[in-house]
Image (spheres, rainbow, N blue to C red):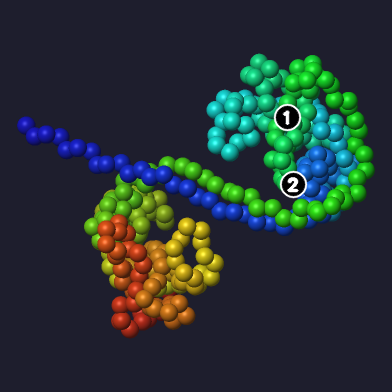
Amino acid sequence: MTAAASPPEVLRAPLVVEFPFTRSLGPVQSAFLTGLRERVVLGVRTTDGKVMVPPVEYDPVTADEIRELVEVAAAGTVTTWAWNGDPRPHQPLGTPFAWVLVRLDGADTAILHALDAPGPEAVRTGMRVRVRWAAERSGAITDIACFEPDGPDGPDGTTTPERQASPHDGRFDDAVTGIVAEARLDYTYSPGRAQSAYINALAERRTVGERCPSCHKVYVPPRGACPTCGVATTEQVEVGPAGTVTTFCIVNIKAKNLDIEVPYVYAHIALDGADLALHARIGGIPYDQVRMGLRVEPVWTEGGRHPDHYRPTGEPDADYDAYKELI
């Protein structure tokens, strides 16, 4: 009787994808965000006379450019809601709260934000709420810290008078003209059978792909299935280590947390025996001498689990016909 083989290790790793998105603001968005800094909520009147909050620059129905700004109240009515019992990092409140759509007095559309409430039993459609302003404001949607109940259920028991929209010229001192939105996604990545085999082989300084049983193409990195035929792939094929640059780009902007001096080159490389090009950095050659057809080989660092970069092999360039189908 033989002992059963232990199952292969399931690879998992935390992964963070983030980038700062920088954009300039037109006159409408600039006025809206600057207004929040000044504790003023602005909307825009559409072609048919409706007031949209938050404002937009083009009518969603007619696509006409719209610029007529109006001031609305900092209080309104909940139109719908959902309870968030487990807030995530960087959400508006650190304790359980409700996501609410609020139609502010004078507006015809609703704005999405958080409502500070002790529990879901304290939230209902149709309840009156008001803005709780952030103590420090800079011209961002977070200048609205959250909404809070208005009237007898509010923190001070007072009721905010209802009001209609009134014209506003959108002029403020030191207007906000641009914003930086930090986009970030945190998750745990598990590569699955095919890519786990690929990663484990790289740790042994080998590059392994998988062959499609139907079209016989070899895919590197393997995906577990042929993207052309849609059938599962299981036959492992070792490719490379050398390959051919099929196309490339010169990077001139330094990436955050990446210790590589610019300019440098990232390229698509068709490894010998593979029918799919992978991408990697090219080193060991001036960036302006990298070219299509350049023959390259991997360079490994001590203890590295994957090639640090690829460098020229010194071989003659590959003929274009040899790699044109992989561009």
Q: Is residue 298 above or below residue 114?
A: below
Q: Position of residue 88 (x, y in %)?
A: 55, 34
In the rendered structure, which disc, 1 or 2, sits on the residue that comes first in sequence? 2
Q: Amino acid at mark 2?
A: Gly
Q: Is residue 207 above or below residue 295?
A: above
Residue 202 visible in rendering = no
Q: Amino acid at mark 1?
A: Phe
Left or right: where 283 falls relative to 118: left
Image disc number at residue 147: 1
Left or right: where 142 falls relative to 38: left
Q: Position of residue 37 (x, y in %)?
A: 77, 44
Q: Is residue 113 above or below residue 198?
A: above
Residue at the extreme front? 135
Left or right: where 51 falls relative to 269: right
Residue under the point 88% across and 27% down: 162
Q: Nearer the viewer, mark 1 or mark 2?
A: 2
- In which quarter of the view is residue 205 placed? bottom left
Give 180 or 113, whichever is nearer the viewer: 180
Give 306 or 179, whichever is nearer the viewer: 179
Residue under the point 23% across and 38% down: 7
Image disc number at residue 139: 2
The N terminus: image quadrant: top left
- In which quarter of the view is residue 279 placed? bottom left
